[in-house]
Image: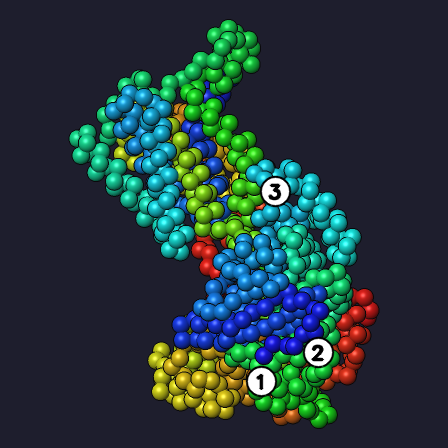
Amino acid sequence: MDYFDIFIGILGSAIRLSIPLLFTALAGLFSERAGIFDIGLEGKMLVSAFASACAAYWTGNAWLGLMAGIVVAIAFSFLHGFASITNRGNQIVSGVALNFVAAGLTIVLGQAWFGQGGRTAQVPGSGRFTPIILPGADAMREVPILGPLYANVISGNNILTYIAFLMVPISWWVLYRTRFGLRLRAVGENPGAVDTAGISVSWLRYRALIVTGFLAGFAGTYLAIAQSAAFINNMSAGKGYIALAALIFAKWKPVPVMLACLLFGFLDAFANFMQGKSIPLIGEVPVQIFQALPYILTCVLLAGFIGIARPPKAGGVPYTKER
Amino acid sequence: MSLDLPKEIEPAIELVGIDKKFGAVHANKNINLTVAKGSIHGIIGENGAGKSTLMSILYGFYHADQGEIRISGKPIAIRDSQAAIAAGIGMVHQHFMLVENFTVLENVMLGAEGGQLLRKGVASARKELKRLEDDYGLEVDPDAVVEELPVGSQQRVEILKALYRGAEILILDEPTGVLTPAEADHLFKVLRVLRDQGKTIILITHKLREIMAITDTVSVMRRGEMVATRKTSETTVEELAELMVGRRVLLHVEKGDANPGRVLLSVRNLSVKDARGVTMVDNVSFDVRAGEIVGVAGVAGNGQSELLEAIAGIRKPASGEILIDGKPVAGIDPAGLRDLGLAHIPEDRHHMGLVLKFEEYENSILGYHRDRRYGRGAMLDLEAMRKDAEEKIAKYDIRPPNPRLKTANFSGGNQQKIVVAREIERDPNVLIIGQPTRGVDIGAIEFIHKRIIDMRDAGKAVLLVSVELDEIRSLSDRILVMFAGKVVGEKTGDAGEQTLGLMMAGIAA
């Protein structure tokens, strides 16, 4: 295997690993731009993964699995909204609480329904999103450079992958070209401006959270029935937090969010590849070092290498009218 | 108590028997008010008199418990801001309701986008802005980002927002607090144009001079009641002040000549940078002598705050020297400076002067808690602290006279008195003061000003920073004007307002 093949291999794997991050970071983009910190992305991913696995297993239909994942994630969004918008609770506390609820609930329900220690049963092929071979992939394979890239990186992904990348321009368009987007960005910066313009701050923020739930539902579904074929305990494994880091790294903008997620996905894929391999002159390096790379990178980048990341000004602050 | 209007003038807005309670606080008591169409009506009153509550009711932020609002003679219900906008009421808030990283155009459009997609609205908003600019002299670049605009322009954006939504009645809440004298003049010019084109303007302020300068009629509020309405041409500043406070007020500070002694505070080539590394104080030098008050005038944000903080030991200077009574104080922390005889009344009592959740007696020794009088070692002597607090309460007439009350429950003026009492009662040699009367009512202003003069007459050095030019002029023996971090000039205490105003705007030196 020459270096180019290795590179293509890592790249393909990077794409697959970055998709849940991308959906989740875009989900976070909508809530945070509306001024609601959502540390609960992790939990939303987890419950939607569980819900989609259950629904896909029972119905044998992947799309019904996706719908279940979305509905449950939106329901969690509403809980977060009820605590932090309606009752003006602390958004971090609410988000962390929901993460705990998600972790516990999925295991308890999973054990009760499937009796496999919190796992769901194996989802049959019809209930999963399987790779799609794009037209001409096999024919292209022999073309130098572009061929393998097309056949192994661009082609051969499941439909959710393509939807994820499609969501990037759509998110951009919604945020910057629609009335909803203008108001959403405004409410994250100065809810007073929105309120005095005669627009309901609460309803606007709830709508942002619905979008968040919708996108987080895709992320969970991808984990459970596209990347794997069942729900496994704690299968989100901190991806929700990494997605948040990507969001900050990308300064709360859609296209940079995509690039940040791809970078984190690439580091993840690279870590997997380096497992058990030795580096010239250094020898075998513990795989943990590579696994830690995304986290180290996050710390280093956030420590100032990306310039000042200015979060939405009203982020984390419940809105109360003066006095 | 409404004004008798000539028959041919129709009322733009009428408030009939408006009543509003917040728990035990009776914020508005049976308010009646009539404002004629095409006039500028001032509403004046001390902090907490209920002006803002009344306007918030008019703008749909609160609902009146009782009473009726009529617009052009028709009773309407203002359930929310949307309804107020629909009724042709526009509001320019004291703290601008602008999205700072949006462009002017986006801010103006927000809430009136004209459809789900922005594209069409952008074009028509641009055209409408141009028209408003031509009609009223409100020139602002529609593509400028709001946070990069000077404050005066930001305010124009607020006015444009209201006009864009078709406001016929414009309410301005303390509009000149953040403006330079020149910007304020420009605002008044705009308001006159608006009035002459038939708009009705309600101006809320606590500045008597503004009322006299621009309004046609004026109403005075005191403790939730509308106590009087006058034609501006038929009243005087003295009468209005008396109506506001309920007793005679000394508007002019009486003070004798200064007797400057030796230099107590000396600042040499001081430069200070802010957190972003921007130079905020740029090579500033001056002296303050015993027995004189030196005022620092300037529009907010020209380095005065950083100057104060550097002298108080809170912010490290980038270069230069500060000497107290001839002794360099580099590297001494605020507690050490207090021991050297420096007292600091900070600009923002909520963030720096007080812990609002503390009880009054706790705040009245804040920063001096290591003093032997208030305890030994790790233990505080609560008894001694409270006794001390009670003495200060009596001496400074702090109300309510309860050292166990939470500080947040005192009015702004009384909170400020707690800070002033704490710092002055230490009998410091050098007193540095930032915005001594911001958000303080007239009665307390008079009191605090007297205390500052007393300090001077007792031979102390006083450095006074204030954005209120009137305050600087009436207290200071010498005036330094700061612009863009530099001291651009020094004048005697009797310098004219116009001279100082031009210097503050960086136009003259």
The local crowd at label 2, few if under 14, some if 14 to 19, many if 20 or more residues have their Cα within 10 Å, is many
Q: Is residue B223 shown above or below A94?
A: below
| Horizontal side of residue A182 vs B149, given as left or right | left
Q: Are marks 1 and 3 on the same chain?
A: yes
The residue to which callout 1 is attached is: B245
Asked whether residue B355 is in view, the answer is: no
Q: Residues within 10 Å of mark 3 (few under 14, many from 20)?
A: some
The answer to whether one can see residue B98 in this image is yes
Which colour scheme appears in the figure?
Answer: rainbow
Residue type for callout 1: Val
Structural distance between the alpha carbons of marks 2 and 3:
41 Å
What is the x, y in percent for residue B9?
A: 70, 69
> Tag 2, which secondary structure?
helix
Residue at the image position 67 percent from the left and 55 percent from the top: B163
Pinpoint residue B264: horizontal percent, then vertical percent.
66, 84
Residue B114 disc label: 3
| Towards the viewer: B52 or A89 | B52
